[in-house]
Image: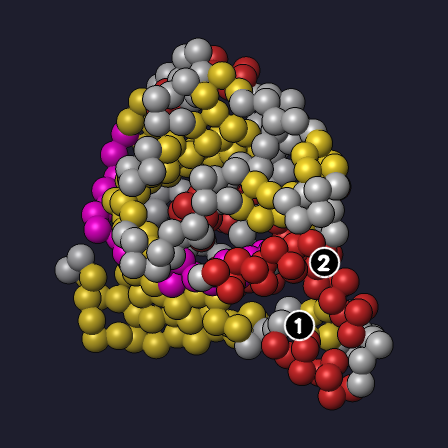
Amino acid sequence: MNSLLSLCLLLCALQTPGDSGASNNDLVADKPKATEVLILLQEITGRPGSSQEEVQIQQVYIASDRILVEDRSRGLIRILRLDVPEPVLWEISGDLTSYRETTDLARIQKDRRQQEEQLVKRTLELSESERTAILAASHIHLDSDGEIIREIRVEEKDSEGERLGLPVRQVRLFENSRLIADLLVADIETPFSLARFHRASGAFSDEVLVALEKVKGLPLEGTIQVVTATLTHPLSFRILQWDRKEVNSAIFNLPENCQLIEEKPFVHCPVCGQEVEREASAARARKRDGTWYYFDRRSCFQSWRKKRLGEN
């Protein structure tokens, strides 16, 4: 599987929601050595909290078991390490003095699944026509036993266009009739399998991951629809340059004397003011500065979201 854009875009979209486990400071001691990487320079538009017109530039370094994204527009560095029992994502400040950490990336899809199951349960009280309309609008499909399923469709066709001087083909991936990925892919081989990054990122359902892993080549342009429990948004990207070379593996370490930002386990819901445990919140949403809101109840989140949509 050579389709790596989901992770690159995920790291653009994701912010670490706070310390979710023991710190991985022991990784700082990883001995430097020459490591082969794939290097991408890419444009990103559509990151949550930014206008659709705002273009952001990222430099991405991808090794066999780790990835670094240098967000030049925001002055941040994100590193995902898979060379540990539990994948860890670091978001490092531009001055290299502090970082946030998360180790439960799988929670993204867990939260989404839970939210969908709650919606299905609530629709049981509605008429058949109302229930069908709501589930269809939410792209939720059920099997004969009423269980949530994800139906995947992939369309692929040759394109006469080129990107970076290379011929590309169009690949479109649908999940429950929703367009999840619309890609222009070139036949470029990567030096290692990237399936592990997709699995660790938590950006997509297992069914979408299986389909993405079958896409051969390197996507050079496209749009990804990232679907989470609290947010559905498109992220568009365009690769400006790519290269393969060896770099010092130390670039994937935490900077020396970089301090972990400790997050309080309890915060207050921005709507009702009730004290909320981060890990047990009913919903959460990212602020424009990259930190998070945690909601006491789903109704609080829905109220906040309705107000936010009205303001925009």
| Residue 271 is at least partly visible in this image | yes
Category of crowding for the residue at label 2, using alpha-carbon neighbours closer than 10 angstroms: few (below 14), some (14–19), many (at least 20) = some
Q: Which type of secondary structure does the marked residue at label 1 adopt?
A: loop
70 shown above or below 310: above
Quadrant into which the N terminus falls: bottom left
| Percent of width and height locating residue 192 | 40, 43
| Percent of width and height locating residue 147 | 78, 70
Task: Give the amino acid at mark 2.
Answer: Ser
| Percent of width and height locating residue 9 | 41, 50
Given residues 193 and 226, the one toward you in this image is 226
Residue for badge 2: 299
For the residues marked 1 and 2, what is the alpha-carbon distance in whole angstroms?
20 Å
Given residues 170 and 260, the one toward you in this image is 260
Residue for badge 1: 140
103 shown above or below 162: above
Magenta span covers which residues? 223-246
